Image (spheres, rainbow, N blue to C red):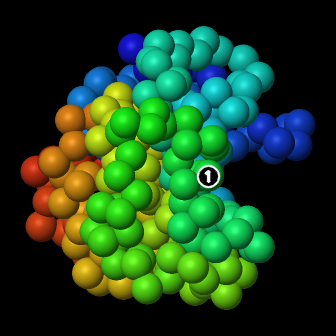
Amino acid sequence: MIELSNVDFFYKEGSYVFKNFSLSLTHKKKYLLQGKNGTGKTTLLKILLGILKTKNGKVTLEYDKRKTLFIPSTPFYEPYLNLGDFIEFYLKKMIKIPDDKINIDKILSTLSLQDHKNTLCKNLSKGTIQKIIISPLFTDYDWDCLFMDEPFEHLDMDTCSILREKILKSDSLVMLINHKEYILEENLNVRFERISL
């Protein structure tokens, strides 16, 4: 169960991001989190991930954190590692996916990253770095929960299509922030429940 009941949250006292806010999420459902910039979408994701603590109210986060993936809106990387080494470090050491669930060559091929395998991360484009950040979705690991903050950002249309299909076919609980609605437009009403802030 993932549930927020009458929670308050603020960064600066008296300036509420959420006040008496409630939300209940069902496992294996897909949610599209919508709202203008500054309405608290990323903050809400971080509350649901347990990164931020609410000031009041009840928070129930009953899910396996080992099987929960967060795709942040700001890509990160180790500038002086090459792509091949960094993606292996990212998947095995940072995300802690078991070795037997990772096929690096398959991931590099699926995401068209083979030609950049030996390129230092500091010389990669934002789109290429973003491919690394979404790469855990292309392992054989079974995720229970996927929290994604603008996962399509910086990606070319071919990769957006691959990622879209991966998300739509997933049996995980999905919470997605996405301003590029045209990428999902034909599936929005059918498969995603909208949450507006």
Q: Quadrant of residue 121?
A: bottom right
Q: Position of residue 137 (x, y in %)?
A: 36, 50
Mark 1 Cα-neighbour bin, 10 Å: few <14, some 14–19, many ≥20: some
Residue located at (67% from left, 64% from top): 76
Residue located at (64% from left, 73% from top): 82
Q: Is residue 113 left or right of residue 132?
A: left
Q: Is residue 111 left or right of residue 76?
A: left
Q: Position of residue 186 (x, y in %)?
A: 12, 67
Q: Quadrant of residue 195?
A: top left
Indicate whether 86 appears above or below 13: below
Indicate whether 37 appears above or below 66: below
Q: Quadrant of residue 105?
A: bottom left
Q: Nearer the viewer, residue 61 or 80?
A: 80
Q: Tag 1: residue type?
A: Phe
Figure quadrant of the N terminus: top left
Q: Position of residue 67 (x, y in %)?
A: 44, 28
* Residue to which mark 1 is pinned: 89
Residue 174 visible in the displayed image: no
Q: Position of residue 169 (x, y in %)?
A: 16, 48
Q: Nearer the viewer, residue 107 or 55?
A: 107
Indicate whether 110 appears above or below 166: below
